[in-house]
Amino acid sequence: MPELPEVESTCRGIRDVLLNQKILSVHIRESRLRWPISPNLAIEIKNSTVLSIERRAKYILIITNKGTLIIHLGMSGRLQVAPLTSPARKHDHIDFIFAHSLCLRFNDTRRFGSVLWTTHAALQHPLLINLGVEPLSTAFTGDYLFTHARQSKTLIKKSIMNHFIVVGIGNIYANEALFYAGILPTRLSNSLSLAECKKLVAASKKILRYAIKRGGTTLRDFLSPGGEKGYFALELAVYGKALETCIQCNNTLSEVLYINQRATVYCSYCQH
């Protein structure tokens, strides 16, 4: 599943090409996504100009002078800027057609993604209005996490994946951040000290920034008609490495533990 760094990297990649460009038309091949695409989308967005491309949580906001596209990549979605002459492939559901014979193509194998349109303030949309703070913002601090954690008896991994507290820390990055902070994912949130919350926030920011940097490197060729995936292979410390050797202490990592049905791996020597 694309997580925050992949979504941020996607935003940066398409922003470089599409900013200030006009959407001439829309070609919808499949409207049955997570929510059906509005039958009026092609009419409402036609001849609108892209003013900015932003990210909120895992949502991509393409803000135009007429309204905002709110795009979620779901489990398997991806966006690619491609030549208009590039043949559509299976699961290429929507083309947003721009000048200079370019299109922004939405591909989604499993169709859990969404493409929504609003003419109101995007951040007031029901999907966005109640979301928590951005993990890379100045609002996400050790004090902020400590305030929420001390009020909760849930596991700390579940807390940092709760998008009403902080957005965008998905399963992979929760595993990694907890490892580098030295905190067991099975700890109760209210057992963490302020110092531990500060370490966890710092680790979360560091791993996300690094992942975004790595993702930016792999997205350098957004015009490729081959449509290569923009998502990167992060140099993971624990996620997906059950029973392998810990990179810090050389002991064996845990077996896979499922927390809220999400795979969890940790080092019982380095994490406490």
Image (cartoon, grey):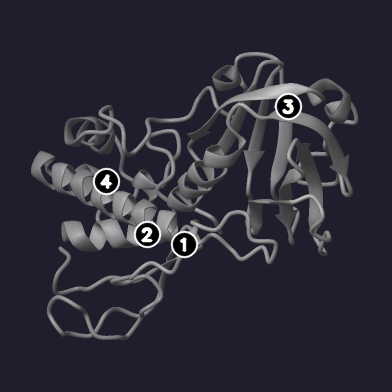
Q: From the viewer's side, name the closer residue of 11 and 272.
A: 11
Between disc 2 and disc 4, whose residue precedes? 4
Closer to the eye: label 3 or 1: 1
Mark 3, residue position: 117
Spatial CA distance of label 1 from label 2 is 7 Å
Mark 1, residue position: 218
The answer to which image quadrant residue 27 occupies is: top right
Mark 3, other Cα within 10 Å: few <14 / some 14–19 / many ≥20: many
Name the disc covering residue 214, or none: 2
Q: On the rendered structure, is 122 left or right of 251? A: right
Q: Amino acid at mark 3?
A: Trp
Closer to the eye: label 2 or 3: 2
Q: Amino acid at mark 2?
A: Arg
Residue 116 on image: x %, y %:
72, 32
Quick check: can you spot residue 181? Answer: yes
Indicate the secondary structure of the residue bearing disc 1: helix
Spatial CA distance of label 4 from label 3 is 31 Å
Closer to the eye: label 2 or 4: 2
Mark 4, residue position: 205
x 82%, y 55%: residue: 85
Between disc 2 and disc 3, whose residue precedes? 3
Q: On the rendered structure, is 83 left or right of 200? A: right
Whether pointer 1 and pointer 2 mark residues with C-beta atoms closer than 8 Å, the reply is yes
